């Protein structure tokens, strides 16, 4: 049985993709399955935490002891997180949130009248950055999905978004990351880093939650 090192802690976790509507029957999204985020929710619960899981559309069953909030779009995920975050101790952004959404959602199905179709996009709110900015007492953990220069981009995100920790995965390797059962993470914080080698996402989730719990405790001890 894992140590109850997160007993009594409130943790908000985002998981899965978001879907951004184009018209009543179409959307754009990404390949996130939710496996990594759901594994983190399970690990946090096993370590004694109370978990709110804000999830985009996935084909997984949520742990029944989690408070599950289902959303579709990035804007809905943002609103759900902001409503839950005030009493939280730890936030983990594992969702693959769409950076952009179509600027105008068409009320009717778009017809195929033209040879070309141009969509215009507008930036979505950054949930992780807003949590870090607005709730400075919350220990904030981001993910970084990169296809190149993984550690440089991850360290940039850690500093720019003022996070406590960031877990980077190289999503150019299709055997790990999006949708697969395995992953590998390099975790960065201000003073250090740690590599978590390729493993089942359920195993990796425990290793990451262990690190989060240690650093959370260090921060609150100092
Ligand atoms: O779901 P799986 O199939 O198991 O795959 C897991 C995963 C690859 C999706 C996961 O491990 C992962 O890397 N999640 C983050 C994906 C992502 O969107 O990374 P990013 O580098 O684009 O975003 C950086 C961080 O900002 C992330 O913590 C993200 O949740 C957050 N973000 C991004 C944009 C936005 N508008 N709001 C956010 O909160």
Image: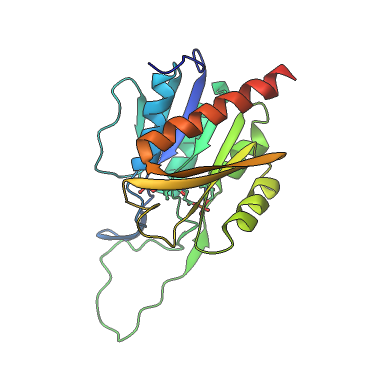
Q: Residue at x 37, y 53 (%)?
A: 178
Q: Residue at x 26, y 82 (%)?
A: 113
| On screen, residue 213 above or below 5 | below
Q: Position of residue 145 (x, y in %)?
A: 49, 54
Q: Is residue 130 left or right of residue 121?
A: right
Q: Position of residue 217 (x, y in %)?
A: 63, 20
Q: Is residue 190 left or right of residue 72?
A: right
The answer to which quarter of the image holds residue 202 is top left
Q: Position of residue 132 (x, y in %)?
A: 64, 37
Q: Is residue 94 left or right of residue 215?
A: left
Image quadrant holding the C terminus, namely: top right
Kindly give the residue lying farthest to the right in the view shown. Answer: 222
Looking at the picture, tell me which residue is in the foreground, 188 or 120: 188
Residue 198 visible here: yes
| On screen, residue 73 above or below 7 | below
Q: Residue at x 40, y 29 (%)?
A: 41
Q: Position of residue 57 (x, y in %)?
A: 30, 45
Looking at the picture, tell me which residue is in the foreground, 149 or 23: 149
Image quadrant holding the N terminus, namely: top left
Looking at the picture, tell me which residue is in the foreground, 39 or 110: 39
The answer to which quarter of the image holds residue 133 is top right
| On screen, residue 147 above or below 88 | below
């Amino acid at each position: 049985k894992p140590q109850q090192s997160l007993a009594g802690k409130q943790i908000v976790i985002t998981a899965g993709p978001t879907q951004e509507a184009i018209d009543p029957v179409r959307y754009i999204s990404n390949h996130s399955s939710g496996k990594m985020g759901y594994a983190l929710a399970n690990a946090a619960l096993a370590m004694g935490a109370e978990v709110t899981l804000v999830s985009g559309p996935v084909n997984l069953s949520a742990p029944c002891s989690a408070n599950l909030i289902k959303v579709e779009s990035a804007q809905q995920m943002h609103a759900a997180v902001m409503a839950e975050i005030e009493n939280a101790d730890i936030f983990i952004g594992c969702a693959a949130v769409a950076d952009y959404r179509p600027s105008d959602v068409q009320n009717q199905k778009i017809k195929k009248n033209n040879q070309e179709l141009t969509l215009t996009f507008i930036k979505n709110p950054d949930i992780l950055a807003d949590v870090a900015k607005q709730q400075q007492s919350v220990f904030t953990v981001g993910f970084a999905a990169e296809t190149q220069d993984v550690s440089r981009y991850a360290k940039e995100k850690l500093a720019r978004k003022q996070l406590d920790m960031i877990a980077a995965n190289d999503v150019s390797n299709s055997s790990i990351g999006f949708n697969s059962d395995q992953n590998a993470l390099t975790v960065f914080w201000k003073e250090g880093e740690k590599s978590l080698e390729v493993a089942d996402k359920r195993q990796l989730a425990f290793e990451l939650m262990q690190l989060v719990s240690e650093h959370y405790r260090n921060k609150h001890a100092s």
